[in-house]
Amino acid sequence: MRHGRTVLSSSFKSPSVQLGNILLLASITKTLSESGTRNLDPRSIPISEPLVLQVLAKNSLDSSKKIDFFRWCCSLRPDYKQSACTYSHIFRTVCKAGFLEEVPSLLNSMKEDQVVVDSETFKLLLEAFIKSGKFDSALELLDYMEELGTSLNPKVYDSVIVALVRKNQVALALSILLKLLEANNVSIINKAIDVSLPGSFACNELLVALRKSDMRVEFKQVFDALREKKGFEFDTCGYNICIHAFGFWGDLGTSLRLFKEMKEQGLVPDLHTYNSLIQLCREGHLEEALKLVEEIEGRGFVVDLVTITSLLIGFHKHGRWDWTERLMKHIRDGNLVSHVLKWKADLEASMKSRKNRRKDYTPIFPSKGDFSEIMNLIGSTISEMDTNLNSEDGCVKDEDSSMDMDQWSLSPYMDRLADQLKSDCHSSQLFSLSRSQRVQDKGVGSFDIDMVNTFLSIFLAKGKLNLACKLFEIFSDMGVNPVTYTYNSMMSSFVKKGYFNQAWGVLNEMGENVCPTDIATYNVIIQGLGKVGRADLASAVLDKLMKQGGYLDIVMYNTLINALGKAGRIVEANKLFEQMRSSGINPDVVTFNILIEVHSKAGQLKEAYNFLKMMLDSGCSPNHVTDTTLDFLGREIEKLRYQKASIMPNKDDS
DNA sequence: CTAGGGTTAG
């Protein structure tokens, strides 16, 4: 078929041309993969841009051959110049294959060819550099881009900043942003700012990173610079970040000012905003915190577990459990408050009767002295409890018309369970899973169970295990269907008292009951397990969690690594650390502190030192905890040096 | 895609 028909569009080639190309392409590919560019003859090959692109796009050809071919084509200059498009291709190939060392010379030849690739390709290159830790190269490339002076997509800077932040290169990201903000005379930079900064995602990311790294001064610097920049306005998220950060660092005045300002800007504060502000109750401003709760309710938001946790931690910190009473009064009537009060009353009633019921709990709760503390926690008012009975099938039936009750009510279960308990002679059975399962699964995520979990977390976190156990005991007797965290807490309590069989029972029963919604709640359990050196159970929890499709965030990883490490399971801790990194989570200062400490205490000083080095290399700045830990490491090293003056870990580098 | 509570030392 050789009739020379005109090709209408370059993308629709005649069959003959197509066939010819295919054959040519096949032959080149074959030659390349067999013997590289050695046997290619420029005179016999009609090098054209589409052809080069097609070769570069060949999946069967490995990247090194493609790069060779590309260089071979370049060598044909001045007869043949590569187009920007081809450069774009080869850069992508290079990035994909990780041959970043090829980049500088490729950039040079691009310069010679007097073409410039698109912003997107630059962005990919920068990100590839940053991803592989070649920050210097990334900066060089940035300079080079400025030098080229071409119109670059301002979003390139955003992506660079974000990429750096994610690589813990907060300081570097900071310097780039500040440079952008200050460089009023460089047109390209200005362009970048004008388009990119309003409502910028990158700025928010950087601010968050600065807050997390406790870089107060730098945070303020960026904050001020952004505010001075004309045309820049924070979005809701940005305001939230700043409000939280200033409050976090104790500058409540600024937090509140920003809060006011954002409302004036016409932005609507959301639950994030309020929950950030409520943190101020940690500083003792309990009254104001409650006012905010009022405002939340007034605006139609519903307080969530974060709100409650923040408040309770604040109350706890200031020893003001009596404020829970006031909190409940502030929570919107008709919705939560009645349930909260009811829950409270039920708990009280249950506890009152408990005293007469089980006596064989003593060995599990050797210390009874703190009982009054629970009473304080719950408050002293004893309201009459609702004595509704529930139906046999486990559904809640509400006969109290005055209180719009729903499935959150606990008292019907409690009543029934109280009866069961009376007839139940297995008082040594610490809890009954079948009993729990009989209750319909409606309470998951509801307020009451969260409330209990919150108290449990606090008790467990403060080492008040007996209190936590007690609370849980009461709680599970009420027959609330436990969510995973509750099981976990329970298990933790058992473990701490040596009731391993029961703990395993819980583990096996957890099954589908896992409630994966709130990862924070899983942490305390692992922490507790780690503290008693039962990381094997922590691993089991983890396994189950993962099988349920749960995911791990950085705090969870840290908690787990800590638990494993403290239990002396260093190998597993390290494995988890690797898993964490391979799942794309960057270790933070807490992770490194844990790893350094764990290895130090295990006598693996060299490893500890390596983690310190890794931490510094990854741009993660040490904090006060690191200092304490390093003191320990230093002493251990000193000790070792004293013992064996000759064989030393490579300590004296830094 | 980014924001709030929950993770580490003494």
Image: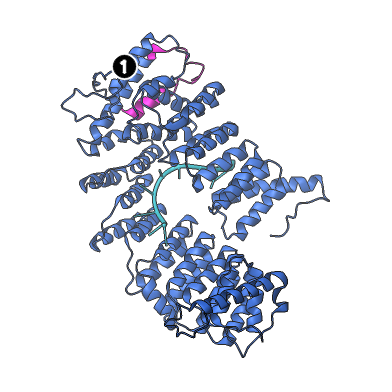
Chain colours: A blue, B cyan
**Residue A426 visible here:** yes
Q: Is residue A258 magenta?
A: no
Using a 10 Å C-alpha cutoff, classify the residue at mark 1 as few (fewer than 14 neighbours), some (14 to 19) or many (20 or more).
Answer: some
Instruction: Give the residue pinned by disc 1.
Output: A416
Question: Which x, y percent locates residue A577?
Answer: 60, 47
| Chain ID of residue with mark 1 | A
x 26%, y 29%: residue = A341
How many discs appear? 1
Q: Which residues are magenta?
A: A355-379
In the rendered image of this protein, does residue A214 appear above or below residue A576? Answer: below
Q: Is residue A634 visible?
A: no
* Picture layout, residue A405 above or below residue A259: above
| Residue at left offset 43%, top offset 19% | A432
Local SS, label 1: helix
- Residue A60 position in % (x across, y down): 61, 65
Pick out the residue farthest to the bottom: A78
Which residue lies most toward the left here? A402
Q: Position of residue A631 (x, y in %)?
A: 64, 48
Question: Foreground: A466 or A480?
Answer: A480
Instruction: Please identify the quarter of the rendering in which residue A133 is found.
Output: bottom right
Give the residue type at disc 1. Answer: Arg
Q: Quadrant of the C terminus of chain A?
A: bottom right
- Tell me which residue sits at (47%, 75%) in the image: A119
Answer with left or right where residue A299 lies relative to residue A285. Answer: left
Say which residue appears at 38% left-offset and 26% top-offset: A374
Q: Is residue A358 magenta?
A: yes
